[in-house]
């Protein structure tokens, strides 16, 4: 499964500017001026919706999408011609870099699709909800909390309860359940929760999230 982008509007110059940035990186790009077609395209592969705000029905389409359940409601949206993006008209030679940077800020590196192949990844969901910078910061804070727990002299029931809540809320339900069991389960349950924490930290520190830290810095 690759990433896809939906381009909504009737100005062919938007697609002409975006396609050369995304398609060589393996993205599927769907351009349409029909709101019903745009909505029908929404699925777990969609990592970007770009709207030409001048297009008829653009505001209504955005409101419709934001009112839908996740993940559709959290699809990153950029406005073609909006702040930080190339103005309407033939892009200048350096506009492509600005457009690529604006897209990467909300989707992650354009050439890196590992997270988007895993639509249930906690980090993938956070990127779509918060943007790359805030998602990286939140995951890093979560990782710091887990590291502190691994070096704590004593795991109290209150600490286990807190860790269960944090892990579940941020999107690691298995880890949350492990810490929930540790709250009342004794030394063996605590060791299992700590092992699960170490495994999760390994993914965070050496896996998908690590590749996005520089982008979020």
Image (cartoon, helix red, strand yellow):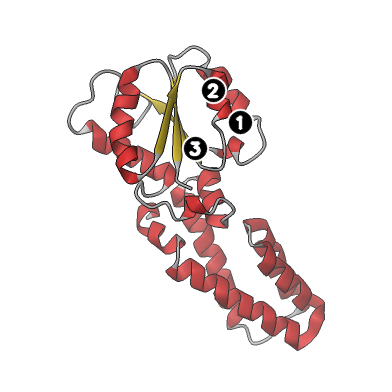
Residue 136 visible in the snapshot: yes
Q: Which residue is mark 3?
A: 76
Disc 3 residue crowd, few under 14, some 14–19, many 20+, Cα 10 Å: many
Q: Which residue is mark 2?
A: 37
Q: In the image, which disc is placed on residue 114?
A: none
Check the image and name the residue furthest to the front.
1
Q: Which residue is depicted at the point 43% across and 14% down?
A: 54
Tell me the SS state at disc 1.
helix
Q: Which residue is depicted at the point 44% across and 50% down?
A: 133
Q: Which residue is depicted at the point 46% across and 17% down?
A: 33
Q: Which residue is mark 1?
A: 66
The percent position of residue 123, horizontal first and vertical second, equals: 53, 55
Labels 2, 1: front one: 2
* Res. 209 image quadrant: bottom left
Instruction: Tell how many labels.
Output: 3
Q: Is residue 149 left or right of residue 79?
A: right
Query: Disc 2 to disc 1, how far (Cα)?
Result: 16 Å
Disc 1 residue crowd, few under 14, some 14–19, many 20+, Cα 10 Å: some
Q: Nearer the viewer, residue 21 or 57?
A: 21
The percent position of residue 64, horizontal first and vertical second, equals: 62, 24
Q: Which residue is depicted at the point 54% across and 68% down?
A: 143
- The reply to whether callout 2 and callout 1 are in contact (CB within 8 Å) is no
Query: Disc 3 to disc 2, how far (Cα)?
Result: 18 Å
* Res. 158 image quadrant: bottom right
């Amino acid at each position: 499964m690759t990433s896809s982008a939906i381009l909504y509007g009737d100005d062919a110059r938007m697609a002409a500017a975006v396609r050369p940035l995304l398609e060589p990186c393996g993205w599927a790009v769907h351009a349409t001026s029909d709101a019903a077609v745009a909505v029908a395209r929404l699925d777990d592969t969609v990592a970007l919706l770009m709207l030409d705000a001048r297009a008829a029905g653009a505001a209504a389409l955005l409101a419709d999408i934001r009112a839908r359940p996740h993940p559709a409601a959290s699809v990153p949206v950029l406005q073609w011609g909006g702040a930080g993006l190339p103005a309407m008209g033939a892009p200048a030679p350096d506009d492509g870099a600005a457009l690529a940077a604006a897209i990467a800020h909300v989707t992650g590196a354009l050439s890196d699709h590992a997270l988007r192949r895993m639509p249930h990844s906690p980090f993938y969901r956070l990127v779509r909800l918060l943007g790359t910078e805030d998602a990286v910061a939140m995951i890093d804070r979560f990782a710091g909390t887990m590291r502190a727990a691994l070096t704590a002299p004593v795991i109290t029931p209150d600490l286990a309860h807190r860790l269960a809540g944090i892990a579940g809320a941020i999107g690691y339900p298995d880890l949350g359940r492990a810490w929930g069991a540790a709250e009342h389960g004794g030394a063996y349950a605590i060791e299992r929760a700590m092992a699960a924490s170490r495994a999760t930290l390994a993914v965070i520190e050496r896996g998908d999230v690590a590749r996005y830290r520089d982008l979020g810095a």
